[in-house]
Image (spheres, rainbow, N blue to C red):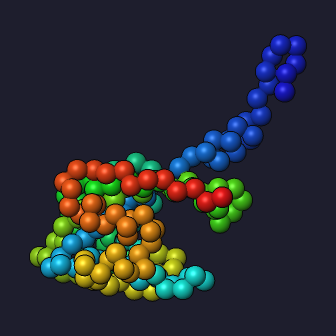
Amino acid sequence: GKKEGIILYNPTRIRRMVCAVSARNSAKAIVLHRGKILVNRCNSRFGEYYALPGGGQRKGEMLTETVKRELLEETGYTVTPLRLSGIYERICEGRDEGLCHKIYFIFLCKLEEDVPCKVPSEKDRFQIGREWIDVRSVRSSNLFPRAIRDNISGLIGYGETIFIGSEKER
């Protein structure tokens, strides 16, 4: 509030405002191998679906480090990011109060075949497994978010980063 021309700040309110608008970075991977794409198989109250493996960036971590760590944790596979294929932004209702703002950085990755696959150490909340699905069937699969599914050929093939859009739940 104001008092004699001086603005008084409430640090708690400012912290809440900053948190409300901050976005969470997430590094996702498109891992191509022998005509197939690696996906996480998931099950939630909405039913079964697929999602690209990957997850949240930690403080002080480069996005390429995030995607490698998350892939190893969720799938047991070791990958090398080749290029940033796309960026996707999403704002939706959060688990707690308020909105959830995520920015997905989607990397095209190479499977390191010479490194043995390990047992996944930390699955995603709704993840029930991992699968390799035929790249030709991705567009007709239940891959979420739909913007990634609908743009999969561009994410794989263009050789440059594409912005595939923003989505805001109302």
Left/right placement of residue 21 relative to residue 104 reads right
* Image coordinates for residue 24, horizontal then vertical, percent: 50, 53
Residue name at image x 70 percent, y 45 percent: 16
* Image coordinates for residue 18, horizontal then vertical, percent: 63, 41
Residue name at image x 32 percent, y 77 percent: 138
Quadrant in which the C terminus is drawn:
bottom right
- When asked about the image quadrant of residue 116, the answer is bottom left
Residue name at image x 53 percent, y 49 percent: 23
Quadrant in which the N terminus is drawn:
top right
Residue name at image x 47 percent, y 75 percent: 124
- Vertical placement of 134 versus 111: above or below? below
* Image coordinates for residue 32, horizontal then vertical, percent: 21, 72
Left/right placement of residue 69 relative to residue 83 reads right
* Image coordinates for residue 12, horizontal then vertical, percent: 74, 41
- When asked about the image quadrant of residue 153, the answer is bottom left
Residue furthest top as drawn: 5
